[in-house]
Image: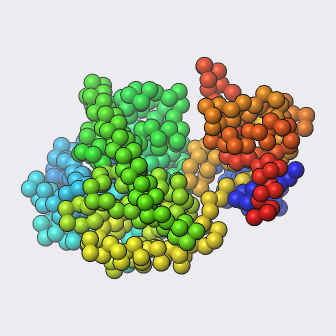
Amino acid sequence: MKSQAKNWQNTSYDEAVAKELQNSLKIHPVFCQLLVQRGIEDYESAKQFFRPAWEQLHDPFLMLGMQKSVQRLLEALVKKQTIVVYGDYDVDGTTSVALVYKLLRKYHQALDLYVPDRYQEGYGLSLKGVEWAATKSTQLMIVLDCGIKGHEAIARANELEIDVIVCDHHLPDETLPAAYAILNPKQRDCPYPYKQLSGCAIGFKFMQAFVQYCNIEVEVLEEVLDLVAISLACDYVALTGENRVLMYLGLQKLNNSPSLGVAALQEQLQRQPYYTVRDIVFGIGPPINAAGRLADARLAIQLLLAKTPQAATDYAVQLTTQNTNRRAIEQQVVAEAFAVLEAEQVDWAKQKSIVVYQSDWHQGVVGIVAARLVDHYYRPSIVLTLSEDKIVGSARTAGNFDIHQVLEQCQDLLLGFGGHQHAAGLSLAPAKLGLFIDRFEEVVQQQMTSQEEQPIQRVDATLELEQIDDKFWHILRQFEPFGPQNMRPVFASYGVVDTGYSTVVKEEHIRLKVKQKNSKTKTGIAFRQSQHFEAIRSKEPFDMCYVVEENTYKNKTNLQMNVRGIVTGEIEEENQST
């Protein structure tokens, strides 16, 4: 039965190129198919993909503004000028500040740091931050993960005779702020070959250039690679090219010899045997983020800069406590947001977007709540609350729909906005709320295609169950680290049959024991898919798509299929009739 659910979508690739690659690599054709889907089309590219190494990092001086930035930094060091390291309050921003500060404090004493208050100052380089820097007789500010739109604040810094070096990865406006230097590979005429770095990764490239210019041992850079990995994972940037190399090296650091602060946080979170990108996103990231969401983001930086195990432990305990509090607040706001939508009795056949507002919602969790709404309704979602005299909030998208582009077409109704394709922040006057909700829905209606209205289950390759063995896993895991644009491959197997030993777990999951033709029994877990159990245990053939992963239970590790989708005969008939 080679059926397919209507939301399964096969990833395209050039079969001729895959065959040619298979002739040179001599590995299973499925792996060559996966490589070509990732733009890896020749032996040398495959070799680099499978063996990420320090030597694959680009020369930092290829980045526009780098020479000028390094020379200005050296001038500050030689003249013992006060340097303030300034960064955003999220994970990317706090890791950025910690990385640059941690490295520079080895060579410079007149060093301070500043993180804006999420509620008093909002996102970006603030006037308050610049004025504070002036009170410290600052002559150089290194601004990380923000600043590319900080025209007013940078103009004020210039008036105060403070030079500003901007290290940002967000999309610039047509006109750049009048900073002393700007490091952003997305700015016009920047020849840097890789454009998708996180803010922390750009800070790392700045420090790499500094170390290279001064002939400092490269080990000082290796000390901060765990911070780069945390930023890349939590900022959801593409794990291709240089980002993939940095993530690979960063995971080695994080798993083998993490900094004191990261190690203390791992202990509080019940240390994993091996941390993956997913473990960072759902484990390490939230407590670091919680500092800026509920209180002061400097607590996260203090953790990442801790010099003693005891200090690191103290900070880690505080952060995990704050994260527990954040979860409770989040759950309450999620429940209230769902209640608002249910009360409105929305016609989801007609409405393509969600904008919900309540004046007393906690500003620190609105982004997370927006993501929860997207997960449930699969629509671009904005959650808004009141902050002093303006409405502020966060937007999250569904699939790959570009929410930043939608906000651009609403900017005449906004006080400000910023972000990227998948997530953004915004603010507006209360009087404009109704107009904004109508405009946002109108633009989404115009731009969203019918294919974008439903979640699509990507399927990368067809696989026979008998092919899943230790040798297969040994090669598959070399595709790690998995993340955006290098997602864990999804395989489909057709004509699978229950062995009679599949069971329902906790009333909603299925623990699968299945075979295909003459294969050995294979184990899988299908979360929240118990509706298929009756059809499966009838022993009629069915189709499934899944990822292959390791599962450790009672200190025993085995390969299992994590099932993403199941198509039984009954489901297929329903699909054909609709």
Residue at coordinates 19% horizontally, 62% vertically from top-left?
388
Relative to 229, residue 317 above or below = above
Total numbered badges shown on the rendered structure: 0
Q: In this view, does 473 lie to the left or right of 184?
A: right
Residue at coordinates 47% horizontally, 56% vertically from top-left?
373
Q: Is residue 222 left or right of residue 303?
A: right
Q: Quadrant of residue 167?
A: bottom left
Q: Where's residue 498, x and y in %?
A: 82, 35
In the foreground, 2 or 32 = 2
Q: Where's residue 471, x and y in %?
A: 76, 33
Q: Where's residue 1, x and y in %?
A: 87, 50
The answer to whether residue 412 of the structure is visible from this angle is yes
Q: Is residue 20 left or right of residue 460?
A: right
Q: How is the image coloured?
A: rainbow
Q: Quadrant of residue 500?
A: top right
Relative to 555, residue 281 above or below = below
Q: Is residue 529 left or right of residue 385?
A: right
The answer to whether residue 103 of the structure is visible from this angle is no
Residue at coordinates 41% horizontally, 65% vertically from top-left?
355
Residue at coordinates 46% horizontally, 27% vertically from top-left?
271
Q: Where's residue 446, x and y in %?
A: 54, 79
